[in-house]
Image: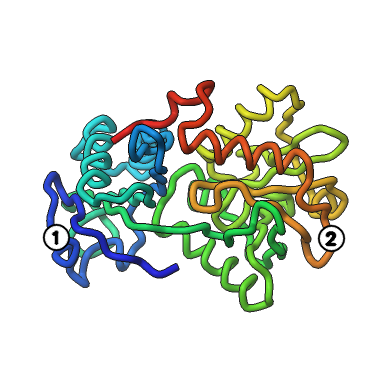
């Protein structure tokens, strides 16, 4: 999706003009993928722009840093305030927010011992990642030929920039074959997640996301949805899922900060009932919650 520039980007502790936020072509992660990032959204609420689950996102960024052994120069709390500052400065009522930390210019080679760490946060307007009608009409899914990372190869628990080459391969394969998104299996042939979303399978009134051990990122939107469905009285179990479980599902939906809640209407050209009743309830509740319209979950909305 095209990027629409805003006024400023926060870099290493200060706001600088958007067009001045540049890095050198020999910056370490351009060559080795040694960066970590988050995707966050701010929504328009009655109290002004509010960032949804900002604390949890920045805490996950810090955990990604621990996994990659990146010494972060800022705390989670400092980055939370910086994100609010960026959104305030933009003047946007709603936006997508991208914090990123990476090894900066100055060293080349695989060792990162003497590399400095740079941190930046940008925001810009961004619409529905899988389409404005993804929650109602659904999206077409293809099981990718590309296998999800193994925990001992590239830890999926970290939102590492280099990890997403795997996701890009799967996403482009799906798009070029005429589908909207890819579902990725792990090396055992079990469902892990989509190229950029967590997945929920519904059958016989039970909701089944794949377990994290299968190779999924521990999604913050996933956690939000699990809180919803448990509060609604549904049974949720983390089950190992084969591709045949997708073909026989009563309904499937995928979730993520970018994708929000999107229904699935087919997998490998096998129709899936869409949108299912659980998907509809969850999508409506999510849309209300992120905009500060549900008092039960208003603590997740941090007004800037």
Horizontal side of 100 relative to 106 (left or right) equals right
The correct choice, above or below, for 143 with respect to 300 in the image is below
- Residue 94 visible in rendering: yes
How would you rate the neighbour count of disc 2 (Cα within 10 Å): few for under 14, some for 14-19, many for 20 or more?
some
* Between 145 and 291, the one nearer to me in the picture: 291
Horizontal side of 98 relative to 14 (left or right) equals right
Horizontal side of 55 relative to 14 (left or right) equals right
Q: What element carries label 1?
A: strand
| Residue positioned 33% across, 54% down in the render | 35
Mark 2 vs mark 1: which is more N-terminal?
A: 1
Which label is found at residue 299? none
Q: Name the residue under label 2.
A: 271
| Residue positioned 13% across, 44% down in the render | 13
- Residue 67 visible in rendering: no
Residue 185 screen position, x and y as percent: 68, 55
The correct choice, above or below, for 170 with respect to 71 in the image is below
* Between 63 and 44, the one nearer to me in the picture: 44
Q: Mark 1 points at which residue?
A: 17
Q: Quadrant of the C terminus?
A: top left
Query: Which residue reaches farthest front?
Result: 46
Tell me the quarter of the picture where residue 161 sits. bottom left
Q: Quadrant of the N terminus?
A: bottom left
| Residue positioned 25% across, 50% down in the render | 91
Q: How many labels does the image show?
A: 2
């Amino acid at each position: 999706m095209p990027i629409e520039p805003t006024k400023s980007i926060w870099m290493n502790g200060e706001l600088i003009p958007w067009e001045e936020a540049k890095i050198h072509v020999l910056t370490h992660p351009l060559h080795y993928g040694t960066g970590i990032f988050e995707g966050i959204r701010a929504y328009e609420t009655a109290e002004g722009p509010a960032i949804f689950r900002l604390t949890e996102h920045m805490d996950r960024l810090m955990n990604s840093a621990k996994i990659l052994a990146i010494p972060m120069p800022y705390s989670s709390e400092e980055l939370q305030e910086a994100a609010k500052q960026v959104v305030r400065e933009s003047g946007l009522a709603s936006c997508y927010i991208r914090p990123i930390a990476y090894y900066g210019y100055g060293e080349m080679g695989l060792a990162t011992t003497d590399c400095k760490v740079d941190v930046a946060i940008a925001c810009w307007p961004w619409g529905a990642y899988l389409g404005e009608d993804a929650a109602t009409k659904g999206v077409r899914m293809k099981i990718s030929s590309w296998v999800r990372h193994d925990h001992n190869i590239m830890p999926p628990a970290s939102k590492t920039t280099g990890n997403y080459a795997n996701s890009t391969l799967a996403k482009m394969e799906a798009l070029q074959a005429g589908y909207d998104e890819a579902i990725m299996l792990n090396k055992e042939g079990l469902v892990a997640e989509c190229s950029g979303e967590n997945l929920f399978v519904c059958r016989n009134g039970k909701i089944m996301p794949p377990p994290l051990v299968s190779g999924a990122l521990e999604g913050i939107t996933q956690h939000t949805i699990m809180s919803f469905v448990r509060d609604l009285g549904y049974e949720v179990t983390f089950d190992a899922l084969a591709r045949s479980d997708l073909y026989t599902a009563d309904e499937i939906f995928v979730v993520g900060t970018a994708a929000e809640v999107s229904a699935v209407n087919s997998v490998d050209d096998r129709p899936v009932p869409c949108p299912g009743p659980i998907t509809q309830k969850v999508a409506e509740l999510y849309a209300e919650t992120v905009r500060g319209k549900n008092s039960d979950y208003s603590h997740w909305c941090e007004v800037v």
